Image (cartoon, rainbow, N blue to C red):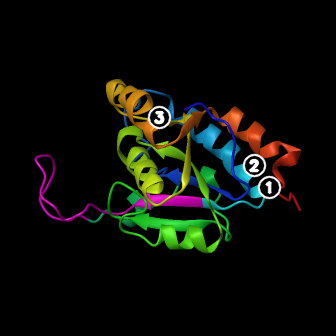
Amino acid sequence: MPLTTLDPNTALLVIDLQKGLVNGDFIHPIAEVIHRTRALIDVFRTRHLPVVLVNVAGRAPGRTEQGPRGGTSFSEKWTELLPQLDQQPDDIAVTKRSWGAFATTDLERRLKARGVTQVVVTGIVTSVGVEATARQAYEQGFHVTLALDAMTDLREEAHQYCIRNVFPRVGETGSSPEIISLLEEPERGVSAS
């Protein structure tokens, strides 16, 4: 569904932009994803809207056909958020041990305590952390918007599958300039003070 509106109390969820993940062989330049995400972060902060910085620090313990068996923890350096995000004391920091940011954290409670009704999702990778977070947000009753130009994947087919088949079922999609334009509309009723 194309982007139509943003609720007055919308949060930005930045997924897995951390040191251990950004050196992958992504289909889009990671510097552009970071730049667009940072532009969104700046507008959300200016509007005093919640910014959630999510990192992944391990795997769920279930057996899979890929990777090691059992839960795995990652080093502190690997999980460190990118300095370009310029983490602020008012940001909500979330560390997850699963694909999505809601399943193994208290993120839903923290957002609802702040009256958040909608989330904008950015980050890496489209078909894992971003998709799982968007699905979980939708299942928890949040309106979901996905900033398509502020995410990327390791595989083009996985990225396109999410954009064409998954995201339209869980929310609206748009570009970071479109989202910023909606955030800057004076009739939104969001105080810039």
Q: Amino acid at mark 2?
A: Val
Residue 25 against residue 83 in the figure, above or below = above
**Quadrant location, the C terminus:** bottom right
- Residue found 26% across the figure and 60% down from its top: 59
- According to the picture, the residue beneath numbered tag 2 turns out to be 43
Q: Which residue is mark 3?
A: 168
Residue 177 lies, in percent from the top left, at: 71, 33
Q: Secondary structure at mark 3?
A: helix
* Circle 2: element type: helix
The image quarter containing residue 103 is: bottom left
In the rendered structure, which amino acid carries the disc numbered 1? Thr
Q: Residue at x 40, y 26 (%)?
A: 160
Distance of label 3 from label 1 (alpha carbons)? 29 Å
Upstream in the sequence, badge 3 or badge 1? 1
* Chain part drawn in magenta: 52-72
Image quarter hosting the N terminus? top right
Tell me whether the residue at label 2 lies in contact with that at label 1, contact meaning CB atoms closer than 8 angstroms: yes
C-alpha distance separating marks 2 and 1: 5 Å
Q: Amino acid at mark 3?
A: Pro
Does residue 58 belong to the magenta stretch?
A: yes
